[in-house]
Amino acid sequence: MRFFISLILLACISAQNLQQPRVSPAAEVRQTIGFSEIVVNYSRPQVNGRQIYGTSLAHNGMVASPYGLGTPAPWRAGANENTTFEITDDAMINGKKLPAGKYGLFMEVNPDKWTIIFNKDNKSWGNFFYIKDQDALRFDVTPKTIANREALIYYFDDIEQNSATLYMEWEKKQVSFKIEFDYYSVVMENFRQQLSNIPGFGNGWIQAATFCMNNKVNQEEAIRWADQSLKIYPNRFNDLSVKAGLLEQIGKKSEAETIMRNALANGSEADINTYAYNLLAQKRFKEAIDKFKSNTEKYPDSWNAFDSLADAYGQSGDKKESIRLYKKALEMAPAAQKGRIQKLISDLQN
């Protein structure tokens, strides 16, 4: 009995192969676009003086292997396990839709045209178990010739608000494709999820509404978010001004003006100043100047009110009036502010 137990134990020990460093080390590259994530996991083989393309290292076309399923398969686009490509949200890949998920990334190599393949199998070793019927997306790209890249690499570049381009380089070849997300749709869905959690008990509502106002998107829902915030913080100036801004964007100007008129009548110096700067950022100079001016009338001893009004005139192009108002602010300003204001006056005069 002991003999058989010893044999079983020996067999189990023999089956546990020693883990050793890989010749083609594993790597990962990721990119965030808004709230969307893109992750590529791959291994990095090196050229080592070998011919790469059109050989067993990166074969042309679809080639059957004596291992695995033995069916024709494209290049694994790396080494070792599947190269994988994962997106957390639906995306357009070179203009074609790919649902959120994790995919095996393969490439069918040819001299003048490569086919990029996203396959639903993301757990197999290499390309030995590739099944074409599991392809989720295929499209063609044109490879470019580059200076030698010794170790295969994937990297992101051309980052924009809603997109990024993924590049693959090895030896003297480069291929790339663009990944685009429905940026605002993803952001809105993320906001909805957050607002059903801790952020929904505080300033999250108005922060989401403000984002929509600033980006001119999703105004109808954003107005409801602003109303929800006003239930928590009744008559708060910022919340009222955001709601008014959203109403104006959807053409309800009269309702927006009524809300802002009441808000401004009860607003503090800081409230009105912040609101006027928001108008200034939109280059609505006349409206901004009117609001800044109302602050100087309501708070005639405030150096900051005159400083802000001077700034507005300066941005509108009226240097003469800007200098006059900065001089007025300088008379009342604390010592810590005088140097800054004097420099602004000097810059305007020159």
Image (cartoon, grey):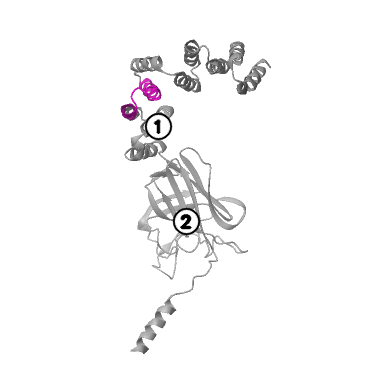
How many numbered discs, if any? 2
Label 2 Cα crowd, 10 Å radius (few <14 / some 14-19 / many 20+): some
- The residue depicted at 45 percent of the width and 39 percent of the height is 162
Expressed as whole percent of the image width and height from the top left, the position of residue 111 reads 54, 55
Instruction: Answer with the quarter of the image where residue 54 lies.
Output: bottom right
* Front one among 138 and 245: 245
* Front one among 135 and 251: 251
For residue 327, side relative to residue 266 (left or right)? right
Q: Which residues are magenta?
A: 224-250
Res 142 visible: no
Residue where numbered disc 1 is placed: 207
In this rendering, the answer to whether 147 lies above or below 258 is: below
Secondary element type, mark 2? strand
**Discs 2, 1 touching: Cβ within 8 Å:** no
In this rendering, the answer to whether 98 lies above or below 311 is: below
In this rendering, the answer to whether 289 lies above or below 35 is: above
